[in-house]
């Protein structure tokens, strides 16, 4: 008719011992699980932060590559300008000697052209310096942004507290012992006001 589960047929003291054992096992399993979750979360955060750092490094490398390409293009412009200046100076001297133009006029024309070329070279140099400074600022901004993202990614992770877990178990165990003792009428748990 009615089947009684054998564990429930035990006396309350045995049930209390089984209950405390199960509580201790559950507390230990919960602590281990929390510790594992915290460790896995830390590994994941480190992985994400490393990926963000690598992405920032790639951006900085791209900026530096573009700066190097622009520097090479500027050097080619300066070289072409220098060649053109040499050609113009040579043609001016040749034309002056062939046409009988006075040397002072030729020298003045060459100096005027050299001055305009010098201004052009100075302007290109200033532009190149501004581009390099801009690239440096961009690189610093990218790295600063990446550092901020990595810092935000590596937020503190709540670690399980073993002492807290043990104290919680102790409090629950004491409550269970008290409840069973009160129900069973254990003498040492009776208060002065109990009949």
Image: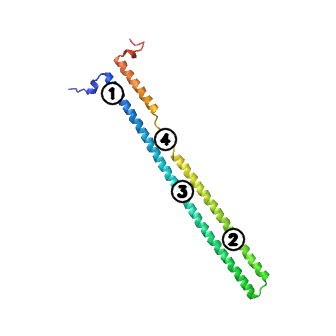
Local crowd size for mark 4, using a 10 Å CA cut-off: few (<14), some (14–19), many (≥20) = few
* Residue 125 position within the rendered picture, expressed as x and y whole percent measured from the top left: 67, 67
Local crowd size for mark 3, using a 10 Å CA cut-off: few (<14), some (14–19), many (≥20) = some
Which quarter of the picture shows residue 120? bottom right
Q: Which residue is mark 3?
A: 57
Q: Is residue 45 above or below residue 80?
A: above
Mark 1 → mark 2, Cα distance in angstroms = 93 Å
Q: Residue at x 37, y 32 (%)?
A: 25
* Residue 51 position within the rendered picture, expressed as x and y whole percent measured from the top left: 49, 53
Tell me the tag on residue 152: none
Q: Secondary structure at mark 2?
A: helix
| First in sequence: mark 3 vs mark 4 | 3
Q: Is residue 146 above or below residue 16?
A: below
Q: Secondary structure at mark 3?
A: helix
Tell me the tag on residue 120: 2
What is the residue that sits farthest to the left in this orientation?
1
Query: Between tags 1 and 2, which lies in front?
Result: 1
Q: Residue at x 54, y 47 (%)?
A: 151
Mark 3 → mark 4, Cα distance in angstroms = 27 Å
| First in sequence: mark 3 vs mark 2 | 3
Mark 3 → mark 1, Cα distance in angstroms = 58 Å
Which quarter of the picture shows residue 82? bottom right
Q: Quadrant of the C terminus?
A: top left
Q: Secondary structure at mark 1?
A: helix
Along the viewing direction, whichever of 12 and 94 lies nearer the viewer: 94
* Residue 179 position within the rendered picture, expressed as x and y whole percent measured from the top left: 38, 21
Q: Which residue is mark 1?
A: 18
């Amino acid at each position: 008719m009615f089947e009684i589960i054998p564990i429930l047929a035990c006396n309350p003291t045995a049930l209390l011992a089984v209950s405390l054992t199960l509580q201790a096992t559950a507390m230990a399993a919960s602590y281990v699980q929390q510790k594992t979750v915290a460790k896995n979360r830390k590994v994941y955060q480190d992985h994400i932060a490393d990926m963000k750092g690598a992405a920032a490094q790639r951006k900085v490398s791209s900026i530096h590559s573009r700066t190097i390409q622009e520097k090479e293009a500027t050097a080619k412009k300066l070289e072409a300008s220098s060649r053109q200046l040499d050609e113009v100076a040579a043609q001016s001297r040749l034309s002056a000697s062939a046409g009988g133009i006075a040397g002072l006029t030729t020298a003045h024309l060459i100096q005027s052209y050299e001055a305009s070329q010098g201004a052009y070279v100075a302007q290109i140099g200033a532009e190149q310096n501004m581009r390099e400074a801009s690239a440096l600022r961009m690189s610093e901004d990218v790295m600063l942004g990446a550092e901020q993202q990595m810092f935000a990614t590596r937020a503190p992770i709540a670690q399980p507290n073993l002492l807290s877990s043990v104290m919680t178990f102790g409090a629950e165990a004491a409550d269970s012992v008290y409840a069973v003792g009160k129900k069973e009428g254990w003498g040492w748990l009776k208060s002065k006001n109990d009949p």
